[in-house]
Amino acid sequence: GVHGQKPVATSRKAGRCLRVLLHSRAWGLTPWERCARRQAQDTSGERMFDHVKFGVSDYAASKAFFLKALEPLGVTVVTEWPPNGVELSQPKGTVSLCLFQTEEKPAHLHLAFTAGNRQQVDAFYRAALEAGGTDNGAPGLRPHYHANYYAAFVIGPDGHNIEAVCHERAA
């Protein structure tokens, strides 16, 4: 398949699905159906990807946006590589997000980041809007996914749908 027509990756950790999916119906299933199917099949509990890397049209704006938006989740710069590339991760993280400058127009992604609690989802949403993101769904329950699916969505600098999601019950 062509990049941009299938999921980038998924990972199951502590009973949660960290979805980094393209919003595509090319496989005949919604991203949530694919995620649920993978959760049911994954019994190892090991992560499925090491990193996700994609090009951005404005490196400085995208780096600033992701650092500010993901700060409430503990994400920081791990390393930078010249001339315009960066790797972001959580402290002691085992997966990372890599961004690099490109003139190519990448397909829009749907990136969903795991939040440890609902307050982190709320903080992500506020930080992402302050960083220049556009509202694509305020923090709240999404019971059409499942009873405890608490998420917020913003559109980032390149039009990507960026989500923070918590699968835990309210504290």
Image: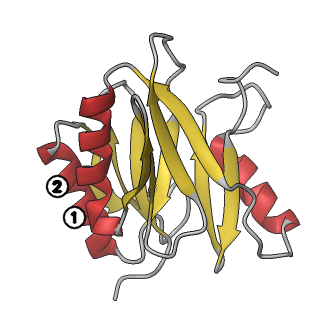
Judge left or right: residue 113 versus residue 18: left
The quarter of the picture where the C terminus appears is bottom left
- Residue picked out by circle 2: 126
Q: Position of residue 77 (x, y in %)?
A: 37, 56
In the image, farthest residue toward the left: 130
Front position in the image: 5 or 27: 5
State the separation of the CA atoms marked 2 and 1: 5 Å
Q: Quadrant of residue 36?
A: bottom right
Q: Position of residue 80 (x, y in %)?
A: 41, 45
Relative to 167, residue 66 above or below: above
- Disc 2 marks which amino acid? Arg
Judge left or right: residue 3 versus residue 67: right
Q: Quadrant of residue 63?
A: top left
Relative to 161, residue 24 above or below: above
Q: How many neighbours does mark 1 have within 10 angstroms: few (below 14), some (14-19), or many (20 or more)?
A: some
Relative to 3, residue 74 above or below: below
> Element under label 1?
helix
Regarding residue 136, the answer to whether it shows in the image is no
Q: What residue appears at the point 72 percent right and 31 percent down from the top-left corner?
A: 6
Relative to 97, residue 61 above or below: above
Q: Are marks 2 and 1 in contact (CB under 8 Å)?
A: yes
Residue 123: give its label. Answer: 1
